[in-house]
Image (cartoon, rainbow, N blue to C red):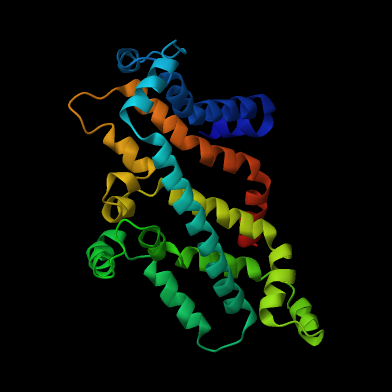
């Protein structure tokens, strides 16, 4: 190990080899998913690693056996609504925790952070009873409401707000702006990388959410993409080519979002570390 460490420290060649190996190892599952989407089930089971000619047949089977358009729309609608509301509510909370002075706010933040230790399985049944009594099953409100405010996002915005210049807020108050105008006109533009990073994390979590939609979205017409993909494995025989194609389509929005907003995501995460 000492020899290897010494060689890595003094030779850029070994560093490049190591980085390339890690990158190839990381992207291999994604490559195998895309390749498998173009092959039939028997080829996927056999571990075929090159693209095939079965893509259009898999597409035809997918549209014939699943309502993927409705599932995509359900996922997109609920995810966008949850992302917008979560970012708005949690950013206001994080802004308030940092800007306003109160001797009990640190205690409240600690309580919020402790709530992250509670597993979802322990509150799943009470949540279901509450939403069932409120007639919110099979609704977008039922999907979104439990995740509008999260301790992680509030903490994330609070940490980033520590770098926000308080003098700017004080000057804006002197100029006659109210708190909400300061939030919209000053805080939001300056903290846009933080908002972008939080939006990416929230979007990915909402898009890939499986357990709560499985409970609250009980009708076939309200199924999201994770539920549709899981349903493809419920039969006696699984069409792995169709399954991989569905997973590829499900993965595409999050990949596009991350790569188009990668720079802002890094800026937002680095800001939270500071």
Q: Which residue is at a point 73% across and 78% down the rendered structure image?
A: 166
Q: From this view, report whether residue 251 is shown above or below residue 161.
A: above
Query: Image quadrant of residue 169?
Result: bottom right
Q: Residue 112 location, x and y as percent? A: 43, 73
- Give the percent coordinates (x, y) of residue 138: 31, 56
Q: Residue at x 53, y 68 (%)?
A: 90
* Residue at 71%, 83% in the rendered image: 178
Tell me how many marks there are: 0
- In the foreground, 70 or 155: 70
**As drawn, is 241 to the left or to the right of 198?**
left
Q: Nearer the viewer, residue 7 or 265?
A: 265
Could you tell me residue 222's position as x and y percent?
A: 34, 48
Q: Residue at x 69, y 70 (%)?
A: 184
- 68 in relation to 48, above or below: below
Q: Does residue 133 show up?
A: yes
Which quadrant of the view contains residue 129? bottom left
242, above or below 231, in the image: above
On the picture, is 86 further left or further right than 195? Answer: left
Q: Is residue 205 visible?
A: no
What is the residue that sits farthest to the left in this orientation?
A: 236
């Amino acid at each position: 190990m000492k020899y290897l460490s010494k060689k890595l420290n003094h030779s850029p060649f070994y560093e490049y080899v190591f980085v390339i190996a890690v990158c190839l190892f990381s992207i291999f599952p994604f490559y195998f998913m895309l390749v498998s989407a173009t092959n039939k089930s028997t080829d996927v089971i056999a571990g075929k690693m090159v693209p095939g000619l079965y893509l259009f047949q898999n597409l035809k089977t997918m549209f014939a056996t699943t309502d993927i358009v409705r599932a995509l729309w359900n996922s997109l609608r609920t995810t966008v609504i949850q992302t917008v509301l979560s970012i708005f509510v949690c950013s206001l909370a994080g802004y308030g925790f940092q800007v306003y002075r109160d001797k009990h706010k640190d205690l409240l933040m600690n309580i919020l952070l402790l709530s992250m230790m509670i597993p979802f399985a322990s509150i799943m049944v009470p949540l279901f009873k509450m939403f069932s009594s409120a007639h919110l099953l099979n609704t977008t409100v039922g999907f979104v409401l439990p995740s509008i405010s999260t301790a992680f996002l509030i903490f994330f915005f609070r940490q980033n707000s520590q770098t926000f210049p308080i003098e700017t807020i004080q000057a804006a108050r002197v100029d006659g702006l109210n708190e909400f105008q300061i939030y919209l006109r000053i805080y939001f533009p300056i903290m846009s990388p933080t908002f972008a990073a939080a939006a990416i994390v929230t979007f990915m979590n909402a898009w890939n959410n499986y357990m709560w939609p499985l409970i609250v979205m009980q009708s076939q017409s309200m199924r999201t993409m994770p539920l549709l993909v899981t349903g493809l494995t419920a039969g006696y025989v699984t069409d792995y080519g169709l399954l991989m194609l569905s997973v590829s389509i499900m993965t595409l929005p999050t990949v596009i979002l991350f790569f188009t907003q990668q720079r802002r995501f890094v800026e937002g995460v680095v800001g939270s570390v500071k």
